[in-house]
Image: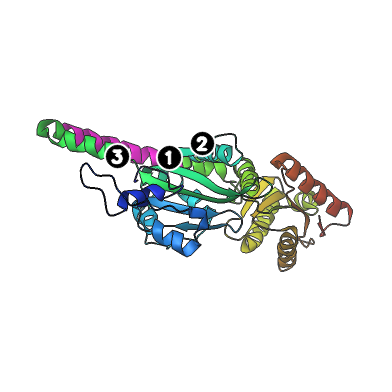
Amino acid sequence: MRHALICGLSGFFDSATPGRAQMGEASSIEPLKFNVSDMNDDTLHTILELVSDGIWDWNANTGFVYRTARWYEMLGYTPHSLDNNVLTWENVIHPDDYPRVMALFDDYLSQRASGYQAEYRCRMHNGDYLWIEDRGHILARNADGSVARMIGAHRSIEDKRRLFEELERRNHSLEALVDERTRELSRVNQQLQLQLEENRKLAQTDTLTSIANRYRLEQVLPQSCERAQRFREPLSLIAMDIDDFKTINDHYGHALGDAALVQVVENVKRFVREGDLLARWGGDEFIMTLPNTSLAEARTLAEKIRHGLSELLPVGDFQVTMSFGVVQRFDEEQQTGLMARADQALYRSKIAGKNVISG
C-alpha cells in the first residue's frame, strides 16, 4: 500500500479485513466495498491520516488542498503548519525540477497523458532537499472537462542512497577516504553554491534600483501566466513610467535623474505585496506583476501608488508623477499579448495628459 497511489483505498481495507479462512477452507466473508467519492471530506481525511505515505487531496474548484500529517513530517514541518493551497506545493519544489514537474502535471490534467507520476526534489524545513516520488489520480472532473478533485501521494525515495552509505561504512579504511573526499566536495559545493547564488542575484537585479530587472521579469511572467491558466486564477499587470523623465535628465543631469528613479522605486515598493514582482523594464518604465489579482484590485493598487508619489519632494521645478496602464490577463492569453495590452494602456494614459491610470 505504501508504494501505491491512493486512488481508491479499497485494497487497504481488503488486506485488513478480519476472518481469513483456515488452510484448505474458502472464506465466507465478503471484502469491504466502497467508493472514495462517496465519502465526505472529514471521513476521507481521517482514513488518509492512517496511511504511511504523504497523502494530498486537492479540491480544484475551491483551491483547498488537504495534506496528511505524514506529508509535513516527511519534510520536517509541524503537521498542518502551512497554507492549504497549491502554492505550498509549488514553493517546496526545487527550481530546477519545477518546469519538468509542471509539464507532467499539465499533461495529465489536459488528458494528454494517462497518469501523473514524477520524481523530484522537495525543500525541507531545514533547507535541505529530499528526493520524493509523487503520484496523483483525478477523482472527478467538471462538466467542461476541467479537474474538480484530485488525490495523490508523496513518498521518499532516499532509501537507496542511505543503503549505499550503510554499505560503505562497513569498509572502515574506505570510509575514511570517502568521508575526506565528501567533506572536500561539500566545501567546494558550498563555495560554488554561494557563488552561483550571488551570480544569479546579480543577473536578476537592476543595479541602480536593486529591484528585479528585465531578465528576471521575462523569467517570472511566463510562469505566472501558466500558473494563472492552470489554477484558473486572475493575473494582472501594472505598467508605469515616470512622466517627463527626459526633461528632468536634460535640466538637472543624469545623476539627479538616477536619484529620482531610486526615490520613485522606494516609494512604489511600499505598495508591493507578498507574491507581487516589481521590475524595471527599461529606462524609467516599470512593470508590476500581480498574481491572483483582479483588474479592479489592480486599479486600486495603482491609485495608491499614484497618490503615494504626491508625497515625494520635487526634483527642481518638477513634481514627479507617473502614468499607469493596468490590465488583467485573458483566458489562454500568453505573456506577449498581456505585455502589449499593458503598454497600450500606458500609452493611452500618456496621451490623456499623464499622471493618469488607464486600462
Instruction: Please tell me whether mark 2 sits on a helix, a strand or a loop.
Output: helix
Q: Is residue 314 visible?
A: no
Residue 177 at x, y percent in the picture: 17, 32
Q: Where the C terminus falls, by quadrant?
A: bottom right
State left or right for residue 115 relative to residue 228.
Answer: left
Q: Which class describes the residues within 10 Å of circle 3: few (<14), some (14-19), or many (20+)?
A: few
Q: Which class describes the residues within 10 Å of circle 1: few (<14), some (14-19), or many (20+)?
A: some
Chief SS of the magenta region: helix
- Please provide the residue range marked out in magenta: 177-197
Residue 150 at x, y percent in the picture: 53, 49
Whether pointer 1 and pointer 2 mark residues with C-beta atoms closer than 8 Å, the reply is yes
User: Which amino acid type is shown beneath numbered disc 3?
Assistant: Arg
Q: Inspect the magenta stretch and tell me whether residue 84 lies in it.
A: no
Instruction: Please tell me whether mark 1 sits on a helix, a strand or a loop.
Output: strand
Give the mark nearest the N terminus, 3 or 2.
2
Q: Which residue is mark 1?
A: 120
Q: Which mark is residue 100?
A: 2
In three-dimensional space, the C-alpha distance between marks 1 and 2, rounded to whole angstroms, equals 9 Å
Q: Of 30 and 348, which appears nearest the observer?
A: 30
Give the mark nearest the N terminus, 3 or 1.
1
